[in-house]
Image (cartoon, grey):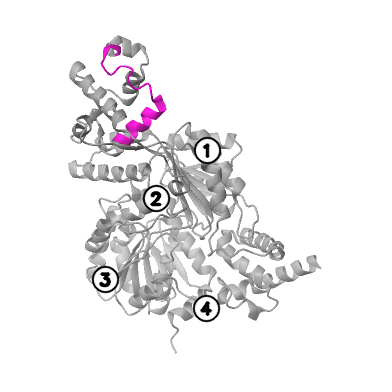
Amino acid sequence: MAPTPLDVLHRVFGYSEFRGEQAAIIDRLVAGGDAVVLMPTGGGKSLTYQIPSMLREGTGVVISPLIALMHDQVEALRAVGVPAAYLNSTQSPEERREVEQAFVDGRLDLLYVAPEGLSTPRMQELLRRGRIALFAIDEAHCVSQWGHDFRPDYLWLSNLAELWPEVPRIALTATATEATHREITERLAMHDAAHFVASFDRPNIQYRIVPKDDVRHQLVDFIRTQQAESIDAAGVPVPAAGIVYALSRATVEKTAEYLRAQGINALPYHAGLEASVRHETQTRFLREDGVVIVATIAFGMGIDKPDVRFVAHIDLPKSVEGYYQETGRAGRDGQPAVAWLAYGLADVVQQRQLIDKSPGDRAYRQRMGQHLDAMLALCETVECRRVNLLSYFGQASQPCGNCDTCLAPPAVFDGTVPAQKLLSTVVRLKRERGQQYGAGHLIDVLVGKRTPRVEQLGHDALATWGIGQDLSAAQWRGVVRQLLATGLLAVSDDGYGTLQITDASAAVLRGERSVQLRQDVVDASAARLARRANGDRGASVAELPEEARPLFEALREWRAQTAREQSVPAYIVFGDATLRAVASARPTRLEELEGITGIGAKKLDQYGEALLEVVAQSARDAA
């Protein structure tokens, strides 16, 4: 009898059951139907096209936008005995010829290619010479011209339906709004596809957003707290790996240098570095414990590292989609992780200026402005972060009890009078002086600070001079930031970051609209939040009894040594969940390893005896 998807899942990948809609998606593809799949990072998207590629006649062709991701996925497949390969620009002509011949001969279950390569006549001719089981379009949101990660070559992929009409297609993404979902369907001509939308919730990630106040010191405190609190499911302290995102290359370099000076093992990563340096950085991040990468958004999309314990942003992301995708690189193993963001007024002004200077047309700038508005709404909400985030993707939810606004609810106050004072100052300066000014100068006027510029311009004679002394300058920056977020203030397009009122401001100035503002929560509660995150690990995490922990550590040491010998990341050998299961079961025969999660036939044959020896040696040491 032909093997079933469940047979392959158990025999090859070592798992006993499918999660969510994985089985339904696989059945759809095996039967020859198309599918559009929205599933969060860590939800098991890869299995939904890998297993059908193994069951259908021919080779599954996977279109992947990143070379690093291709390499990691091929290595992981080969480790469980699946014949897989990739074709990309890193290979020599001889290596390419070998892979091409293997495809033509039908010796591959999966072949990974880049979208840029697939559209070439040479690649199309190669595919016609072989048998194609299916096309899998990974990171399908890249087809959206309004999205955060648009790749023009993805638009060509709509031709697959005409060139290979009998071959089923699956488009997958971990981040898409309802509008992007529709665009994926239309631009890839997948009108007859079945749609599978999983929950976007990542309950193991704790979201924290704090106002900037000496962000480098804040970042160091945050990382040190994470590393001090980082323990695995066995209760053993482990160095915490993390990613820090910054907007510019210069900030990346300076931040990495600062972190290293503070004793944190930090490495920079951005597109301006030599390719060999970027490769070495990625390799160290994958294979060493406790490495912190400081990067632009060029890093991470192709990194399949399951045990990233935190993702930090020290600059405001441009969109909620980008933020969700980047934070989704934390906690792919299901263990607790933290997404931390520090942002301030300067971030808002900078992003507005970047949008105004964008080479795109008016519609493009308007769309980018909407992305930013949604990101600001997430930052300034006084409600549950997770509810706001999931709502953006069209998913209703309840307060999570595991984000900063749930664990330490911010105080809210009637900010109508402060808003009126600020808006009135903007109006008076414009009316009396005919000019607009930035936030710093407006705040100087409100708090009555006599700077040379204030005195030179005579702004100490304004009616609003000094009327805001009941708030500090830092508090006034928070007011400005929140008024920008709610559309009661706008950044002028003059290129200088000056502020102006909006149509909505008039109702506030007339007293017809009240303004509720959040009292900025100082990040003093960070340590308490971290303790809560690590103390409440959730029912899905298997805690080990005290007597099993020495064996678990011995298994980790064996895995690290094995991974070094094979020059692969540790998780390709076995994940922590598998090692925990072995430590709990203490098997003494190969048959007892069968059925343990993550141990398929190939890994049982390759590592089974070694695992039993580690278990036996641990027992001898304890005797």
What residue sits right under mark 1 in the picture?
A: 524
What residue sits right under mark 4 in the picture?
A: 11
Picture quadrant of residue 592: bottom right
Given the image, on which type of amino acid does mark 1 rest? Ala
Q: How crowded is mark 3: few (under 14 residues within 10 Å), some or many (20 or more)?
A: some
Look at the picture and state if 19 lies above or below 419. below
Pointer 4 or 3: first along the chain:
4
Pointer 1 or 3: first along the chain:
3
Q: Say which of 469 and 61 sits in front.
A: 469
> Do the residues bearing badges 1 and 3 touch, measured as CB atoms within 8 Å?
no
What residue sits right under mark 3 in the picture?
A: 193
Given the image, on which type of amino acid does mark 3 rest? Ala
Cα gap from disc 2 to disc 4, whole angstroms: 42 Å
Say if residue 246 shows up in the picture: yes
- Check the picture and name the quadrant holding the C terminus: bottom right
Instruction: Describe residue 623's horizontal placement relative to residue 334 as left or right.
Output: right
> Do the residues bearing badges 4 and 3 touch, measured as CB atoms within 8 Å?
no
Task: For marks 1 and 3, give the one nearer the viewer.
Answer: 1
Pointer 4 or 1: first along the chain:
4
Look at the picture and state if 175 lies above or below 466. below
Cα gap from disc 4 to disc 1, whole angstroms: 50 Å
Q: Which percent across, then down, holds residue 18?
A: 45, 74
- Specify start and end residues of the magenta stretch as a single range: 460-483
Pointer 2 or 4: first along the chain:
4
> Do the residues bearing badges 2 and 4 touch, measured as CB atoms within 8 Å?
no
Say if residue 90 shows up in the picture: no
Cα gap from disc 1 to disc 2, whole angstroms: 19 Å
Task: For marks 2 and 3, give the one nearer the viewer.
Answer: 2
Query: Callout 4: helix, strand or loop?
Result: helix
Given the image, on which type of amino acid does mark 2 rest? Cys
Q: Residue at x 35, y 19 (%)?
A: 444
